[in-house]
Image: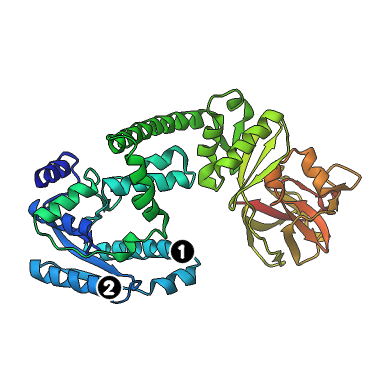
Amino acid sequence: MVEAFIRHIRNKSLLDSSKTYLLASSGGMDSMCLGNLLTKAEISFEIAHVNFQLRGEESDGDEEFLSAWADKVGLPFHVHRVDTYKFASERSISTQMAAREIRYEWFEKLRVERSLAGIILAHHEDDQIETIFLNLLRGTGIEGVYGMAERRGWLFRPLLPFGREEIKSYVLENHIEWREDSSNEKTDYKRNKLRHISLPALYETAPDAKSNLLNSFARLKDTGKAFTALFESWAAEKITETEGLQILPTSAILRTTGAASLLYFWLRPYGFNSEQAQDLLDTCQSGESGRLFESPTHLLNLDRDQLILAPAPTEFEPLSVSENDIEFIIPEGDYEILKLDGKEAIDKSRQNAMLDLERLSFPLEIRTWQEGDRFIPLGMKNAKKISDFLIDLKVPVVKKRSVKVLLSAGQIAWVVGYRIADWAKSTAATRKLLYLKKR
């Protein structure tokens, strides 16, 4: 196994003998085997152990065992003791998730403090299969079969090509001591149920079941990478961005093979799930224009023949603008407040506003528009609901919620970024202008 291990890390350029790494060790069979192999491969490392305090004296025994081993082999030993149950309770997460967050956060902190070249983990072939099945049980799709990478960022997993039985044979043959974690035998957790019940039963169906699974996962992973390249090409061609919106014509997905997956790959970074992607595709096919989809951070709606994605509007507290202010800042941008002579040429950009200063009453107020708001748009004689005004302008549903209005004495003077009110316009009699100019 030593020769195979050294050949593997050299062929994959995984570890550099001129650098020092951090070995994450539980004291169990896998990490003790890895520590031995690293030593024989002449890879320099320090030892890190987290005492999760979940198994009482047994947890303390693991720490003592590793401390003694580190002293024996003359390697730096780092230990982190933590109340995992308290950590999980404070963050409202499971004990397993808490343990994961604790160890990876601390390993990375230690790596940086010690200026180490990476964190070496003892995950092996059987861990990989268990991880993939857990991913599939969570409904992760094709990327679930990717499993754990041999190298990802500062994390290294040089044991992935080696199975549990091979590791066990090696430690027994070389008289390597290790600590047995009693919780590994329990079937309270999904991983242990897979390890002790489901996967052994699956392997019994054929003598080469395990190797066939690994080969299938490898081919599916390659297929997934090919799809990712296809998606990136499709997205670059079909999706456009304007004024903070992403726009996708429905023609780019209707009658397109794998459309639901394309939509999911587009939308998942914004918090949408695969069920929403399928629902969205069904909506496009039925032509149900106007329907709104929401994630924790974004909004998406079908607007006639296009899909429009935008960030969800943030909570906006009404803003007061005094007569002496020289600027104001809203989510849509920063604005200068200038006072000009009434004879100044009018700026007709909808992003800016030029108002008759003497018709305004300070302080002005900026707030999000509300149902029932009305104003007389520039050039018109009759009042119009803001909701109808935005519909007439075909403002996407995803942008309507965040539209702001500027009020003077409770009267709307400007629908910010769209149009001023007729009563607040500059006329031949205007002597002073209030110029609100977007930077």
Say which residue label 2 marks.
58
Q: Nearer the viewer, residue 119 or 205?
A: 205
- Distance of label 1 from label 2 (alpha carbons): 21 Å
**Kind of residue at disc 1:** Ser
Q: Which of the two discs, 1 and 2, labels the residue nearer the N terminus?
A: 2
Q: Residues within 10 Å of mark 2 (few under 14, many from 20)?
A: some
Q: Nearer the viewer, residue 79 or 390?
A: 79
Quadrant of residue 435 within the rendered picture: bottom right
The answer to whether any part of residue 158 appears in the image is no
Q: Nearer the viewer, mark 1 or mark 2?
A: 2
Dot 1 falls on a residue whose secondary structure is loop
Q: Nearer the viewer, residue 342 or 20?
A: 20
Image side of residue 3 versus residue 66, left or right: left
Locate residue 221, reporting x and y percent: 36, 35
Image side of residue 371 versus residue 436, left or right: right
**Kind of residue at disc 2:** Glu
Locate residue 297, reporting x and y percent: 58, 52
Does 209 sit above or below residue 78? above
Say which residue label 1 marks.
94
Locate residue 147, reporting x and y percent: 35, 44
Locate residue 91, reporting x and y percent: 48, 68
Image side of residue 43 versus residue 293, left or right: left
* Residue closest to the far right: 382
Which residue is drawn at the image coordinates 74% and 51% (left, top)? 354
